[in-house]
Amino acid sequence: MLDTSATLNTDIGKGGRVNGRETMARRRYQEGCLFMRGTAGRKVWVARWRDDALRPDGTVIRVMRSQVLGPVSRISTRREARVLLNALLRPTNQGLRKPHSTMQFGSFARKWEEAVLPTYRVSTRNFYRDILRRHLVPKFAQYCLCDICTPDLQIFLNQKAERYAPSVLHHIRATMSRVCGSAKEWGYLENNPAAGVRLPHRYPVQPKVTFQPGDLQMVLDNLEEPHRTLVFLIAVTGMRVSELLGLQWPDLDFERRLLHVRRTFYRGNFGLPKTHTSERVIPISDGLSYALQQHRQRARKSTMNLVFPNADGKPYEAANLLHRVLHPVLAKCGLPRTGWRAFRRSVATALSEMREPVRTTQQVLGHSSPQTTLAFYTQSVEDSQRAAISRLERILFPNVPKFEEGPSLIH
């Protein structure tokens, strides 16, 4: 039978704090109740008990909960079912279980956007907001936070795997984990249900594009200035496009032939580099230094002192540059339609094929590494990077004149 105190004692008592607020919960010992449900041959044991639930305003109420313990064919006696129910209720009776939140996922997602997203960079903020609104909120908006469990998320991700690439699946899981992680920290969840979700094994929907030296030469041959120098720079250094668009002339030290990555430009906003190690120094080769100096002589003037300003003297938008400049040239050259990240991938691949140290590649591309820092390896990494980029330039662009030679970038 249902525990009498659990059935009748539905008033709200005093005690404790949840999520920094005074709650009205009082510990109650209960035994719960057991009953069978289903038709002959498909009967299951069902447990029912009362539990504390956290309202969005922070108060705690008592609600009825039930859970299927298993089929009668496997749990043959009431005694066995009682053992399972006692184990289920033990954390609650010992006061170890936090009240479950009745807040719906959609409401919490809006709160999370208001409280957490402003602490991220603009690009990261847009990324999480996009994943939430395109994938997670449409599915889970009406779910109570406490009702979202790991199997639900796993099935949801498995279904998404039929349409989306592994990278998208990873982003969905990461976003859900961030949201549920905050819900756990704030007292709305006891555990993060996304922690146990596995990514379905899928091959990429589209193969990742990597440019060969002949491909890059063909692309440059079909570009006009200043886009030719822009692509030349990103193809040799592997800079992120946001870093390149935020590049200013004081960031270039032609005397020492160094390029300082100090800022990014993304969707109308300047910001800091992606990570601490993304704020780096990239040695530039002879040919690249010469090309940039030639570009400086003919470049548009910009009040922001930008290396690559648009017609208005402001930074380009990466998406506009991609659709209006790069994609038409790739189509003309018969190359796959891809984005700016392909240049970073091409640099990493080429350096790997040249058997350059992984540390050198990490520093050139600005990837985070627990083993190295720019402050400690500045001198040795700088020499290694300069030699690597010079060799890479000769492989990718054999027709580029040496620093002290001819007047043009490419024949």
Image (cartoon, rainbow, N blue to C red):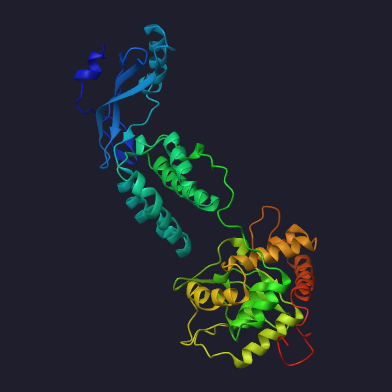
Q: Quadrant of residue 405?
A: bottom right
Q: Residue at x 26, y 38 (%)?
A: 55
- Relative to 402, 139 lies left or right: left
Q: Is residue 76 visible?
A: yes
Task: Give the image location of residue 284, x and y in percent.
Answer: 72, 76
Which residue is at a point 51% across and 76% down the rendered structure image? 321
In which quadrant will I find the N terminus? top left
Query: Residue drawn 71% across and 82% down?
Result: 289
**Residue 252 picture location, percent across and down:** 65, 80
- Indicate left or right for 331 with 96 as reference: right
Left or right for 98, reference 5: right
Number of marks present in the image shown:
0
Q: Which percent across, then down, holds residue 25?
A: 27, 29
Up the image or down, 407 lies above or below 210; here it is: below
Q: Nearer the viewer, residue 29 or 200?
A: 200
Q: Quadrant of residue 283?
A: bottom right
| Picture coordinates of residue 259, whole percent (x, y) | 66, 76
Q: Height in image: 293 above or below 91?
A: below
Say which quarter of the image contains residue 186. top left
* Residue 246 seen anywhere in this rendered image of the structure: no
Name the quarter where the C terminus is drawn: bottom right
Residue closer to the observer: 151 or 369: 151
